[in-house]
Amino acid sequence: MAITKILILGNGPELRRVLSVLESDPEKECVGCVFWKVSDPSNEAIDPSLGMHFWRGTAETLQELIAAQSAKVAIAISSAQERWKALSLLNSLSIIPEVLISEGASVDDNVIIGAGSVIHQGVILEEGVRIGHGCLLLPGSRMGVGSRCGDACIMESGSQVEDMGRLGDEVHLGTRTVVLSERIVGPRSLILPGSIVTSDVESGVIVSGTPASVIESSTFSE
């Protein structure tokens, strides 16, 4: 059985979750981590239990590290905006990131998952789902029949997109949020935890409540 070597590009709590996915997959081996956004890994003690020997370098040296390790790259970043930046970097280097799917996820027929996406334990992807590049679906999230999400989306634990719902690029769904059937959430919008989206959401806003309504006009400063 051929083993795929993986370098993890990331930081923070998502790095530990991605490690768990890799450890449960006999066909993949983590050969180290590449720190995202910090020039010196020793300045940021993300997880002391990993040991500093586990850090191979930073994003600036990613291409050289991949060549030296004969490895592929997985993304372990918890911010939609930062995942988008990581995708842009990888694209500029002609690097296609790995898809990671936990053995505890449920994936129906006719599902398409874009490069660099990570699907964690307990995630449910129903028939005809389409997931863009670099998305992160945390444990217990669900996408209903025929639903879609763009690139670099994040679905927190327990969040749901019901049948034929749509998420634009860089959308972040908070814990236990629900996007009702056929609703559209515009790019770069943030849905706060526990919200229920009953109508379409414009681009770049923060929404909250049941039903969800706009509480801030833009998720990004000019």
Image (cartoon, rainbow, N blue to C red):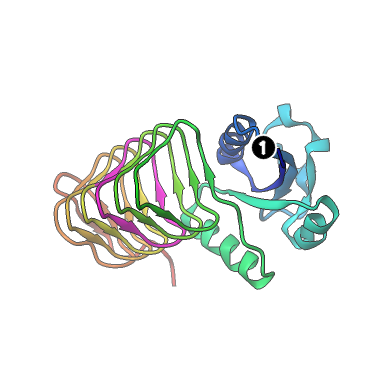
Kindly report the secondary structure that dominates the magenta region of the rendered protein. loop
Looking at the rendered image, the quarter that the N terminus falls into is: top right
Write the residue at 23% across / 56% down: 165
Residue 41 drawn at (x, y percent) = 76, 46
Residue 151 vertical position relative to residue 121 in the rendered view, above or below: below
Write the residue at 58% across / 68% down: 88
Residue 32, located in which quarter of the rendered image? Answer: top right
Task: Please give left or right for residue 64 compared with residue 153 in the image.
Answer: right
Q: Nearer the viewer, residue 6 or 196?
A: 6
Residue 14 drawn at (x, y percent) = 56, 40
Q: Nearer the viewer, residue 213 or 176?
A: 176
Write the residue at 30% across / 62% down: 205
- Based on the picture, tell me whether residue 145 belongs to the magenta stretch: yes
Give the amino acid type for the residue marked by disc 1 in the picture: Ile
Q: Which residue is mark 1?
A: 46
Q: Nearer the viewer, residue 38 or 70?
A: 70
Residue 175 vertical position relative to residue 110 in the rendered view, above or below: above
Residue 50 vertical position relative to residue 56 in the rendered view, above or below: above
Residue 144 drawn at (x, y percent) = 25, 46
- Outermost residue toward the front in this view: 1
- SS of the residue under disc 1: loop
Looking at the rendered image, the quarter that the C terminus falls into is: bottom left
Residue count near mark 1 (Cα–Cα under 10 Å), binned few <14, some 14–19, many ≥20: some
Label count reads 1
Task: Please give left or right for residue 164 compared with residue 18 in the image.
Answer: left
Task: Please give left or right for residue 44 compared with residue 111 in the image.
Answer: right
- Outermost residue toward the top in this view: 49
- Based on the picture, tell me whether residue 170 belongs to the magenta stretch: no
Q: Which segment is the magenta one?
A: 143-161
Task: Please give left or right for residue 66 compared with residue 110 in the image.
Answer: right
Residue 52, located in which quarter of the rendered image? Answer: top right
Residue 146 drawn at (x, y percent) = 26, 55
